[in-house]
Image (cartoon, helix red, strand yellow):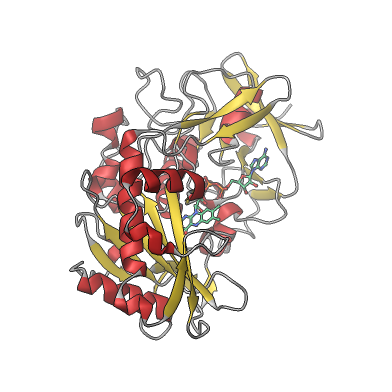
Amino acid sequence: MRAEHQLPIVVVGAGSAGVVVASHLAQDPAIRVLLIDNGDQLGGTSLLNYMVGMWGMREDYDWQQKFGCKGWGWESVQRTFSLLPDVLHCVDESDAGDVDKALLAAAVSRKVPIVGNLYREVLSGRGAGWTALTMKNGKRHSVVETYMSSCTNFANLSIRLQTEVDSVVVNGMRATGVQLTSGELIEARGVVLCAGALASPVLLRRSGIDKPGIGNGLKNHPSIALSFALRESAQSSVCIGANIRESSSIGIGDINILSMNFVDPQQRVGAIIGGVMQVTSQGNVEYDPNTRSGKVFFNTLSTEHDVLVMRETIRQVHAYAESPQMQAIASNACSDDQGTAAEWLGDASDEQIDVWSREQSGVYSHPACTCAMGSPENESAVVNEFGQVIGFENLWVCDASVLPDLPRANTHLPVVMVANRIGAMLREKFRC
Ligand SMILES: Cc1cc2nc3c(=O)[nH]c(=O)nc-3n(C[C@H](O)[C@H](O)[C@H](O)COP(=O)(O)OP(=O)(O)OC[C@H]3O[C@@H](n4cnc5c(N)ncnc54)[C@H](O)[C@@H]3O)c2cc1C
């Protein structure tokens, strides 16, 4: 048997968080790192997301005060955000599309202040600007290009793709390795689960770890879209080039409105999307011990708060769609994929809007909070401020699941921020 310090730290999942964590650990040549993913390439969801970069708002990160996560407050989080490699491309007039330009012009006429760097504006409840995208030289810049290119030749980093982890091997209250679905056992000095908000809680349960918070507290940003026929086909190379932060009557900066220059391959259909960015509805990932799998219940729009903010989001998106600026470039806004004209929304009662939002709303694909970080005294907390599973040695979780609450932002950059901080803490811990 090998001495423990010769064993690898196994990082499970090579997405937005896992790649960052593995790259931090691999910077120390004395630490052996094994990065495992069940997909056929590195990058996870950062390879397919819409690339919109946002930090959120200052109070979104008062985690020490609200959840007892020591060391997590705006000052420290901002430091990490500011030090992230600069991979954001800010769209401008030269690459923006007609929908972007019309949406921003409509925002100006609605007296929304134009903000230069909306992605890192953390105080204003209203603001409009060009979108910041995780792109370089016109191409997606995922966490792979940003964090992995410098370490793929490191002798201490091994990568196994198309390899599915079944569970963590736990001996008493200590993780000693992982078991693959192929049956293979891999001994480890430590295990970091970065499998994403829907998979990490399932992996914990499959490993026999049973804490009340695991899989609970699931949050997501509900969204709606109005699509329309463009008068001329879209010429823009970017899909989403305009970003607007609005406020509801009961919140600040809790509505997000995005342009979509094209939603169809012919580029003749555009859309405006609206998202509720501060939510109180919670769902869960329910674990079934018989099938050893998890079933996801998003439970979105299940609180009065969220229904009300969604109603106001819809009214605002409709107002943008009906604006003279949008009418100049598009016609026939539709409220569903059967082509129902969206005009009716103008006279619709609150009840009609609520029924419609229940039928038509989707989500921004920002699942989070299913292994929430918090104080060990808090029963619903799953990991502590280091990402360590409370009560267990050598076992950490670091991905969207550990966010204790959803920020008013798309989640990729917040997850990357968290992974940079936990990755650095782990490297320090494992320094020989
Ligand atoms: C369609 C879509 C659009 C989005 N658009 C945006 C956007 O524009 N801006 C933004 O900020 N955010 C966006 N997001 C959200 C954002 O990309 C995610 O919040 C973020 O990437 C989550 O990172 P993660 O590390 O938690 O999980 P992931 O990046 O999903 O990584 C998890 C990895 O674990 C692997 N894995 C899971 N289970 C196992 C297992 N048992 N064994 C081995 N490997 C396993 C998975 O294959 C995956 O590679 C979008 C998401 C989607 C789905």
Is residue 263 among what the camera can see? yes
Above or below: residue 144 compared with residue 429: below
- Left or right of 432, for residue 107: left
- Which sits in the foreground, 388 or 373? 373
Q: What residue appears at the point 68 percent right and 50 percent down from the top-left corner? A: 159
Q: Position of residue 2 (x, y in %)?
A: 70, 30
Q: Place residue 38 in its image quadrant.
A: top right
Q: Position of residue 363 (x, y in %)?
A: 48, 48
- Left or right of 288, for residue 213: left
Above or below: residue 363 compared with residue 1: below
Q: What residue appears at the point 41 percent right and 45 percent down from the top-left corner? A: 418
Name the quadrant of the N terminus. top right
Is residue 191 among what the camera can see? no
- Which sits in the foreground, 225 or 403? 225
Q: Position of residue 97 (x, y in %)?
A: 43, 80
Q: What residue appears at the point 68 percent right and 19 percent down from the top-left corner? A: 289
Q: Place residue 95 in its image quadrant.
A: bottom left
Q: What residue appears at the point 58 percent right and 26 percent down from the top-left corner? A: 286
Above or below: residue 387 compared with residue 228: above
Direction top: furthest residue = 172
Q: Place residue 60 in its image quadrant.
A: top left
Q: Position of residue 226 (x, y in %)?
A: 45, 63
Number of numbered callouts drawn? 0
Above or below: residue 4 compared with residue 365: above
